[in-house]
Amino acid sequence: MSGEVELSAEAQTLRSEPVILRDRKLLACGTCGWVHYAMTFDEKIANDRSLVRYKLSPAEQLIYQSAYRQCLRCEAPVSGFRAAEERDLTRAGGHLVTPVMIDQS
Ligand SMILES: [Zn+2]
């Protein structure tokens, strides 16, 4: 994978340190081509922990959890994602790369 393309990662939660995208598994939405990066299991756990202080209701938690399993842009499910290709990454240079949770990772 090329590290040439400058990508900025958005951490939707409260992460203060930048997310390193180099060597990350990048996925493109199979429907609209929006690029996401695969969140690691450890990051997911850390995110979940950081949410505790917000005392989300069960409904809000459901929204939060599902947000990591679909395309940010068109809401297509993660199951329809494919590996990001060079042209996806080129296009992704203009937007934030958002995290998704892949069960099998
Ligand atoms: Zn999409």
Image (cartoon, rainbow, N blue to C red):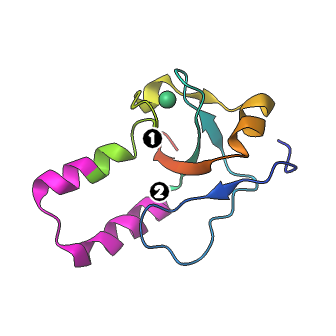
Q: Is residue 65 left or right of residue 101?
A: left
From the Cβ of disc 1, is ligand 1 less than 8 Å away?
yes
> Vertically, is 35 above or below 51?
above
Q: Which residue is mark 2?
A: 41
Q: Secondary structure at mark 2?
A: helix
Residue 79 on image: x %, y %: 45, 26
Task: Name the residue at 61% across, 58% down.
Answer: 9
* Residue at image location 13% in from the left, 51% down from the top: 59
Q: Is residue 2 above or below residue 15?
A: above
Q: Nearer the viewer, mark 1 or mark 2?
A: 1
Instruction: Give whichever of discs 1 and 2 has the lower sequence position.
Output: 2
Q: Main secondary structure of the magenta part?
A: helix
Residue 17 lies within the magenta run: no
Q: Which residue in the protein does label 1 denote?
A: 72
Q: Residues within 10 Å of mark 1 (few under 14, many from 20)?
A: some
Dot 2 amino acid type: Phe
Q: Is residue 43 magenta?
A: yes
Describe residue 58's horizontal placement relative to residue 43 as left or right: left
In the rendered image, the vertical position of residue 16 relative to residue 6, given as above or below: below
Q: Bounds of the magenta span?
A: 42-63
**C-alpha separation, residue under disc 1 versus residue under disc 2:** 19 Å
Q: Nearer the viewer, residue 25 or 34?
A: 34
Q: Quadrant of the N terminus?
A: top right
